[in-house]
Image: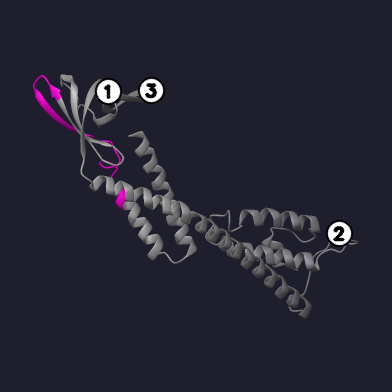
Amino acid sequence: MKNEYLEILELSPGATEKEVKTAYRRLSKQYHPDVSTDPEAKEKFIVITEAYNFLTSVGPSPRAERVTYDYDPHAAAYERQRKEARQRAWRRAKEVERMQQVLMKRILDGFMYLGGLIVLFNLTLAVDYLLPREKINERVIEMRNIVERGRGRVYYRYDEIVFQQHIMRFDKHTLKDLDISGQALMTRTLLWQKPMEVDLATAAGSVRLFQFYNIYRVFGYIIPAMFLVVYLYLYHMKTLDSKLTLAIVMLFLFVVQLVIFFGF
């Protein structure tokens, strides 16, 4: 007689208890909701667990290793065991889901401390950008073209001037044909002292150049983007899944900010 539980576990009539357990371990790992990308993984996992519960409850005894599992689907005992197997499968799935929710809540509770640090850091960036700038005298140490090598080719990335206290980066070809002397007047932010622009003395007169690569110019959009993500996280995301997704986005943006902040 055809047995649908055997088919679910991809087994044939006469399968041993050991084969049932082996098939269950293989398929439950494949369709476990924590690891599977299948959109129907949860339902498949429940069905697989139900099949396993049923077959192990009515399967071979210690003295009878091989059985056919040939049960009458209309028999009361069969239906009772089938119902019990389904209930156990659902209880296990609910427990797995509950543990996932508990884990996500713990992660998000811990993330609140890091989230506060991220907000504070971005507030200082915003204030630093809005405050008046200070001017300092600098001396040019070196000018250079920054190149990057990869895949057998050389890429011209940007121009760079090394001063006594700072390094400023500009779009490529900015320094081309400029005969720059050693003196410069630099404008930088007040809190983080990030250079924003510089007046360079050249043979043809004073030239003003703007820092192109820094946390406030090319990458400045990340600061308002971060505040938007924080706002959505606090006031619009209601489920733990959506909050966890935004927390990951926030953490990613923060890492990018740190790389830019300390690298430029």
Q: Secondary structure at mark 2?
A: loop
**What residue is rendered at 23% in x and 23% in y?**
139
Farthest residue in the right direction? 63
Q: Name the disc covering residue 145, or none.
A: 1
First-in-chain label (1 vs 2): 2
The mark closer to the camera, 1 or 2, is 1
**Residue corresponding to mark 3:** 152
Res. 246 in view: yes
User: Alpha-carbon distance for marks 1 and 2?
Assistant: 77 Å
Q: Amino acid at mark 2?
A: Glu
**Residue corresponding to mark 2:** 65
Residue 119 drawn at (x, y percent): 38, 52
Q: Amino acid at mark 3?
A: Gly
Residue density around tag 3, few if under 14, some if 14–19, many if 20 or more, within 10 Å: few
Would you identify the image quadrant in which residue 258 lies? Answer: top left
Residue density around tag 1, few if under 14, some if 14–19, many if 20 or more, within 10 Å: some
Q: Secondary structure at mark 1?
A: strand
Residues at circles 1 and 3 in contact by the CB criterion of under 8 Å: no
First-in-chain label (1 vs 3): 1
Q: Nearer the viewer, residue 43 or 121?
A: 121
Residues at circles 3 and 2 in contact by the CB criterion of under 8 Å: no
